[in-house]
Amino acid sequence: METFDAIVLGAGGAGLMAAGVAGQRGRRVVVLDHADAPGKKILISGGGRCNFTNLHTAPDRYLSANPHFAKSALGRYTARDFLAMVERHGIAWHEKTLGQLFCDRSAREIVDMLLGECELGGVTIRLGAALGEIGHADGRFTVRHGDRHYAAPSLVIATGGPSIPKMGATGIAYDIARRFGLKVVEPRPALVPLTLPGDEALFRALSGVATPVVARAGKVAFAEAALFTHRGLSGPAILQVSSYWRHGDPVTIDFTPDVMPGWLVAAKRARPRATLTQTLDLPARLAEVLAARLAIGELGATSDRALIEAERRLSDWRFEPNGSEGFAKAEVTVGGIATAALSSKTMEARSVPGLYAIGEAVDVTGWLGGYNFQWAWASGWAAGQAM
């Protein structure tokens, strides 16, 4: 039995962050993972350049059964704090749209940075073996990892959620949480493409066409690009609303977000022989499909009333998704270990001293664009400071 001050389950972003912080505070930490390499999801993120944080991080950009839970951790370890670490390690970065920060070169630099921080803290990392029995008695946690056994007064659940199972993701975090009496908010795929039923095959024929829109689901709206796929809808705007979408609810798209009311009637007065397809400032294939669905050809041959109705439809086009592409294509998970059981300051379970849950394993899910990485860093830092 090898003894440590803390055992961290999961060598992803949150786990490595927590381990590095605790190690540099003088704690003896071991990180255990079944994967053969650390930070695998980091490496594939952002097209291989890792969208590692977002300058506009704020608690209202996260979903949780308790919308206030993330405030403490996000406030105590900010995007600027993580950026300072990135710059300290000499990693070149750039800002894309909407505050999204990426590595100039490779996501590998973020993984190497986290491993470097762990090395500074003397952290032990053990990979490539399955997690076995986990016990708890007399204030000490025990974990079997392959044929080795570990013991420590602190245990950190940082095994993520079930999104992207081809990367080895599982729901083991929830099994561990339930083992200790913690509740789990039902997990579901988030930041995921939505699928359309057969009667929307005409739109699926537009596979590969993208355009800026405003997409809405429930009370939220996102102004970004939507992409038609052979299965349905994707692109940043759709991924964003997918986190809020519930089965049976519609998703509406404004294909003309930048026009003034009455624009089609005005276009008719200016160019009566122009068709709706020619008038729409959209990709040609999409304009043709929308015009066909609206049954409008030349503007001059169409009544003002019909054009006003077309304006309304184009600004509030209703889709009825029949599902999503599931955890296989989901970037993250909504739901997870219930925050009601955790301290928002330390991430420690109130009913099980020494047990912590961080990152995607917890019921805190960010928007697309670096927000989920910032939650990993912030929650990992909070636990690392507390252990």
Image (spheres, rainbow, N blue to C red):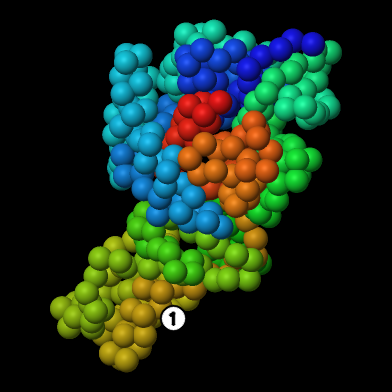
x, y percentage for residue 2?
Answer: 74, 10
Q: Is residue 32 visible?
A: yes
- Which quadrant holds the N terminus? top right
Which element type, helix, strand or loop, lies under badge 1? Answer: loop
In the visual, does 140 lie left or right of 193? right
Figure quadrant of residue 145: top right
Amino acid bearing label 1: Ala
> x%, y% of residue 9?
67, 26
- What count of labels does the image hold? 1
Residue position marked by numbered label 1 in the rendering: 295
Q: Nearer the viewer, residue 152 or 205?
A: 152
Circle 1 Cα neighbour tier, 10 Å, few/some/many (<14 / 14–19 / ≥20): few
Which quadrant: the C terminus? top right
Residue 189 as seen in the image, left or right of residue 233? right
- Identity of the residue drawn at 52% across and 60% down: 244
Which of the pair 313/42 is nearer the observer? 42
In terms of depth relative to the viewer, which is nearer, 272 or 189?
Answer: 189
Q: Is residue 301 left or right of residue 313?
A: left
Quadrant of residue 101 within the rendered picture: top left
Could you say which quadrant of the image residue 255 lies in? bottom left
Query: Compared to 253, does 351 lie above or below?
Result: above
Residue lying at the far front in this picture: please name it. Answer: 138
Viewer-nearest residue: 254 or 50: 50
One can see residue 287 in this view: no
Q: Position of residue 238 (x, y in %)?
A: 48, 56
Q: Please name the residue shown 66% across and 54% down the image.
A: 185
The percent position of residue 79, horizontal first and vertical second, equals 35, 35
Residue at the image point whose x is 35% and y is 88% from the top: 306
Q: Please give left or right for residue 359 compared with residue 165 in the image.
A: left
